[in-house]
Amino acid sequence: MSARPTQFDRNLVVIGAGSAGLVCAMVAAQLGASVTLVERHEMGGDCLNTGCVPSKALIHAAHLMHSARQAAALGLIPAPAAPDTRAAFAHVRASIRAVAPHDSVERFRNMGVDVRLGSARILSRWAVAIGDEVLTTRAIVIASGAAPRVPQIPGIDDTGYLTSETLWQLDEAPRRLLVLGGGPIGCELSQAFARLGSQVTLVQRPLRLLEREEEEASALVQQRLQADGVRVLTDHRAVDARIVNGERVMRLHHDSEDCDVPFDRVLVATGRRPRTDGFGLEALKIEIAKDGTIATSPFLETSVPGIYACGDVAGPWQFTHAAGHQGWHAAVNALFHPLHRIRPDRATMPAVTYTSPEVARVGETERQLREQGRACDVTIHDLAELDRAIVDDARDGFVKILTAPGSDRILGATIVAPRAGEMLPEVIVAMERKLGLKSLFSTIHAYPTYSEALRDAGGQWRIRHAPTWARRVLSRFHRWRRG
């Protein structure tokens, strides 16, 4: 169907029921639009079924086992028995079941969304086929998400591999786990499996873990992983996988030499690729960017007017909260353009890596600013000086805040601490409201809390930037008052 219909069956058709698609469809229904949501796999997408929910449930189970060992080491409880990793995976599945009603077909149909389980194919900017049925629509939103990217390693198909999607088919932790990839997923799951009792080897091709984070954060996370028993091999490249005498072996290359790492299971965590195949983009000649995402305007519209994209398939982030944020904007823009449209904010998108301690970041890093040729002032407050961290025996961490030279305007912040992701919104609000670092210092924080580290960082900045003449004048004033 190439001609514009005189009437439409729907105001909006949304393809994909992950975070982006769910939010988009929900907003459209709340705004009174007629909206159809199409999902070909499972409601909730990757986040519910194979991503955020199961991984955080596993991290929680591993943390409880680790805490029990710590308590036993302090003599607070008897030494725990060997960990029952089957119980950990049972907890993962129970967590998915508990969260699933939030994303269910029934819930969204009760909101007024026409939910269809099946495959969608875009026929034109005005029409979408769902099975044998064709719906006409004023606008279309593609929210098809992303899938794990598997590197071309000779032999890996023969030895078998797990990804963040297939990992949850396990019933217990493997004895020896090899993890390829030192990004957030690789680091989080390496630490979790090590705490569950697996012998974990983490292989990273770049020189350091968590390349997008501040160098201090990367170094601290590596130290903590190693303290938990993870063997970390940075600057190593996987050459091939093979079976030797009935044992699976991965050959690695480092510094002109090869070494073999035996394993029982290998987890591939080397990134994700946008899902752009199978629903008609090629025929419509929708532009694909160099990184494989669907190219969009600042308002999330694709190269075909009236068709929008949001979430992992559009980038530049691959976060559940970013997908939801974009989904809201895509719904408004798709429904009201050209009368009204809004641009999603890109400057204050938070990122959290759920290792122990967590790494939370917003805005620019020092390295990014340096590469852009921009100067900044750096304020760092060490958690070792924080009372709450001392009593919790959680002194490994820091708050690092970057400000514009001669100003308290926050350019970026990194927090490495327990529950760092819960501390970050205070910085985000300050950045969005243009309040500055001094506002964190002047805000009353409950004692003793980790968020006091933000106040202390603000205090450090204020002392460092106090005018030198002020102290001399005040000293003379107080001397005069003493007579």
Image (spheres, rainbow, N blue to C red):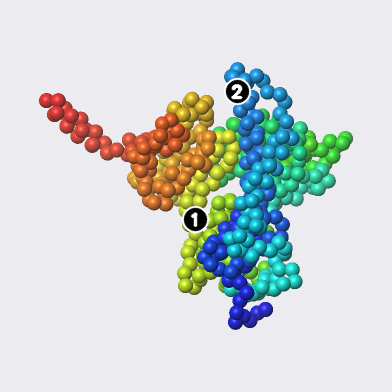
Q: Could one spot residue 287 in this view of the protein? A: no
- Quarter of the image for residue 246 reads top right
Separation (CA) of disc 2 from disc 1: 43 Å
The x and y percentages for residue 260 are 77, 35
Q: Position of residue 165 (x, y in %)?
A: 71, 48
Q: Which amino acid does the dot numbered 1 rest on?
A: Arg
- For residue 38, the mark is none
Which residue does the image show at 53% across and 35% down from the upper left? 418
Q: How many marks?
A: 2
Q: Nearer the viewer, mark 2 or mark 1?
A: 2
Which quarter of the image is occupied by the C terminus?
A: top left
Q: Which mark is residue 346?
A: 1
Q: Amino acid at mark 2?
A: Ala
Q: Residue at x 68, y 60 (%)?
A: 39
Closer to the camera, 117 or 483? 117
Decide: is 394 above or below 461.
above
Is residue 250 shown to the viewer in this render? Answer: yes
Q: Secondary structure at mark 1?
A: loop
Q: Name the residue at 52% across, 65% down.
A: 31
- Say what secondary structure mark 2 lies in: helix
Q: Residue furthest top?
A: 75
Residue 71's mark?
A: 2
Quarter of the rendering containing residue 273: bottom right
Discs 2, 1 touching: Cβ within 8 Å: no
Q: Residues within 10 Å of mark 2 (few under 14, many from 20)?
A: some
Q: Quadrant of residue 12?
A: bottom right
In the image, 481: left or right of 116? left
Residue 229 is situated, as x and y percent measured from the top left of the image, at 66, 29
Identify the residue at horizontal 83%, vertical 46% (top origin).
158
Quarter of the picture containing the N terminus is bottom right
Q: Residue furthest left?
A: 483
